[in-house]
Every structure is written in C-alpha cells, then in structure tokens.
Amino acid sequence: MKHMKPFHWLAIVLVLGALTLSGCKTEHRFVKKTAFKDMDKIVITFAGPVDEAWATNTANYSVYEEPDPDIVLTPKEATLSPDRTKVTLTFPEALNTGEAHILSMTDILSEGKHLGPALLTVKKLYLGVLFTLLLGAALINNFVFTKYIGLCVFFGTSQKRSTAIGMGITFTIVIVFAAMMAWALYQFVLKPFQLTFLNIVVFIGLVSLSVQGVDTILRKVNPMLFKAFGVYLVLVIANCIAIAVPLMLADNEYNAWESLMLALGAGVGFLIALFLMACAREKLELANVPPTFKGLPIAFVTAGLFALAFLGFSGMSIY
Amino acid sequence: MAATTKSNKQLVLDGVLKENPIFRLALSMCPAVGISTSVMNGILLGIAVLFVQVFSSCTISIIRHYIHPRIRIPTYTLTIATWVTVIDLVLSAYFPVAYKAMGIFVKLIVAFAIITMRLEMFACKNTLEKSFWDGLGMGLGFMFGMVTLGFVRELLGSGTLLGHDILGFRPLLFFILPSAGFFVVGLMMGLFNWVDVVYSRRKEG
C-alpha cells in the first residue's frame, strides 16, 4: 500500500462516488429525489411546492418493476407533506425493493404552471445493495452455520486458532480469485454459447486452477507467506464453499461487483466461523468430556450451539 | 494399499459399517447436517452419491493404466464432475420437487472428499469388478448414514416417516430445525463410538 500514489486514491474515490451517485439519478428537472421508504412506500421530493389536488390524485402515478413493464402497480394512497414538496405513495402490497422501479407521472402541476410529464427510476443505492450482499454472505447466511456447506474443512482446520486464521485468509484469497474468473467465464463464454450445463465441470476445474495459480504466484512472490499459508492451499479444493460460490453467482446472474462481494462475504464468513470454533475447541481441550464424545462428536454439538446463535441473524436486513 | 484380497461381500459390508463414510470416516458431512431432515431426502441424495461413486470408480478403474500419476487428481475431479452433471440433469428432470429440496447439495457432490478418496485409495489400484463392489459399499454406506439420520430426525422431529404419520404427535420438534443437524450428527457419532467401546470390551472380557 505504501507505493500508492495520490492519484490512485483519487481514482478510487471517483469510482466510489460514481457508484453512489448512480443510485439516485432522476430524469426530470423538477424532481430532486426518489427513494423507497419502509417496504411499501415511495417518496418523491420535488424542487418546489406542487398543487395538492394534482399530487394527491393516485391516478396521476403509475409504477412498474423494470424487468416486467406489463405488471402495473397502482398506489392506494398519495399524501403530500405540509410544505407541499414531498409526496409519499403507499402501495397495497410490499414492493420488491431489490429491483429498480420505473415511476411515471402525468403533467406535474406547480403553482398553476404545467411542467410536463416525468418518467423516473426509483432504486436503492447500489453500494447499499452490495453491502447487504457482503454482510448477508458473511453473517446472515453464513455458509458454515446456516447453509451447512464446507463442513469437512471446517472441522478439520478449527482445532487451533493459528490454523484457523491461516486457513481463513488463504481461503478468502483463493475464493475471490476463483469467483471473479468464474464470473467472467460464465458471462462471456458459458452463457453466450449456451453451455451452462457444463457449469459443474468448468467451475471445479477453475477452482483447482486458481488454487494452483495462487500457489505458484505466492511461491515466487513471497516465499515467507507461502511457508505460512502453503499447506492450506490444497485443502481449499476440498472445500465445498469454493464450488458453491461460483454456482450461486451463476444461478443468480450476479454482475462483477456483486460476485466480488459474495465471494468476499463467503471468505470472511468462513474465517469468522473458523475463528469462533477454534476458540471454543481450544477450551474444549481442557474440559472433561465423556470419552465417547471426545473429538468430533463434541465439536459437532458445539457447532450446533453456534448455529443456533447465528439463527439470530436471520431475517435481519440492513438496507 | 496394493490390490485388495477381500471378497466382494466383505467390500460392501466394510463400506456400510466398518468404514461408514459419515459416522466412522467423518467425511461428506455437509448434506448429513444440511438436508437430513427426512428419510426421502436421505434416500434420494444417497442414490445420487451411490450413482456417482460407482460410475466414477468403474471409469477410473478402466482407464487406470493410462493415467499419468502426476495428473491423477485432476483426472479424478473431472470424472466425478462429469457423472455429477449427469445425475444433476437427471434428477432435475425426473424429480423436480425433491431436487429443489436438496438445493445445491446435488451439485456439491463434486466436492465430496469421500469419492475422491475412494478413487485415490482403491479404484486406481484394483480391477473393475472390485472397484464396482467397493464403490457400491461406499455409496450404500453413505445412504445408510443419511437414511439413519433422516429416520431419527423425521420420526422424532415431526412424528412421520416418508411423509406418513406414525406417532401422531411431535416428540422433539427441535430435531427438525435446521441447526439441530449438528446436534443429531454429534449425538449419533457419540452413540456409534459408545457401541464400539462396549462391543470391544465385551469381546475382551
């Protein structure tokens, strides 16, 4: 990081800024902002006061989800704020806030002036969606404790804290690497040529390939690091999460950023799970466990308790 | 391990009991915890694993003289992936409901350590016939483990078996909850260990 020039930072800030701004673009000069509120409301902020009779008439608004324009959602109620610049549309059913919605309004009336009809996009901030995905993969839908994937490696490498951290970090690096390659291959080769039935074969090959790639690069670039983490690399192939992430991002048609977040979340989630489990198992070594439960059986029961605790994250939504 | 001298029957029995993949070798735990909530899931995933294990074992056994030792692991992986693709497509076409319940686990058979291990330890050194029986034993052992877990969880959790009401009430609703998979597997492993200890003690004394 110390070789990073200031303009690198500037570029990063610009990219992040562009991502943030792209979340709230509107296409009418009189409309300042559109946003979702709760699960069933859309709030439109105007640049100036609008006429009450026009604003509270629900027939003036129509909304549909971007992918299917045929299904028109009509608001059941439209309320105007006291300063007459904010309209809140309430819908009879919860909106699918993960999708962008197209909102069209008839001729906007403001102080007796006609400002023309408007066609607006309502969507969540993209960074928020990405953050939700990251946190979802790491905590809410933790692969180990709520999806029960990757247990073999999980129980194999959670005996000591140092091993757990080494495995977790190695796994995160490899999974990010593999997921990005899987995304590119899926979007640009498998899908255009309709070879999606080859998903499993291609992705497992890809995971082995990225493990081999990280192995070779690490060996040359940083032999010290390789000494510390090299032994865990082989185990990554045996980890079901490494193959589950590419399959999931192909199934859900995630784009590059979303794939990156899913992979990162999966890696961090696995690291968290491993570390927690290793802490508990180090203490278990000292406990007086019945002989028939020594080793794996008691580890499973402990993991069950963790899984119950992680159940507390379910249904949580950040954004 | 050189070419085996065990009889076919012994190979199958070993796979089911002495080297049971779930309870003794503690491999392929993900589905054992994740979807062992009913007997039906156990049977279907068991069939899928049995199919993949037997066919991969046979394939590797046939071509074992032509595989260069250095690329043996990638060869195993690709062989397994091919057969997993086959069973994945077949299940999604003929059993769409059950396939949905099993979710991603059918595709994850490709990463099961048990199958690769059997190819590495057995199929690449033995004849087609022996490999077939070994694969059958391992597959049946996995199925036995899954069905046992499914039996316990379904009977105690929802009081049913294969969807038929048996008990009429739910003794331990907790068992059907997803996170209880860990507890049930842990307890079953403990039970297997205990039986083992008692059995060997009786043999001695």
Image (cartoon, coloured by chain):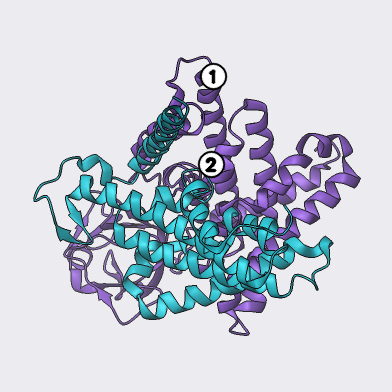
**The one of B106 and B142 positioned closer to us in this rendering:** B142
Q: Which chain has been coloured purple in this picture?
A: A
> Which quarter of the rendering shows the C terminus of chain B?
top left
**A219 left or right, relative to B18:** right
**B96 w.r.t. A224: above or below:** below
Residue A32, how many percent across, how many down? 42, 58
* Label 1 CA crowd tier, 10 Å (few <14, some 14–19, many 20+): few
Q: Residue at x 40, y 80 (%)?
A: B93
Residue on which the image places disc 2? A269
Q: Classify residue B202 by image quadrant.
A: top left
Residue A252 seen anywhere in this rendered image of the structure? no
**Residue type pointed to by label 1:** Glu
Callout 1: chain? A
Mark 1 element type: loop
Left or right for A64, reference A294 = left
Q: Is residue A36 above or below residue A190?
A: above
Q: Nearer the viewer, residue A279 or A281?
A: A281
Is residue B118 or residue A112 the one in the foreground?
Answer: B118
Q: Position of residue A193 (x, y in %)?
A: 63, 85
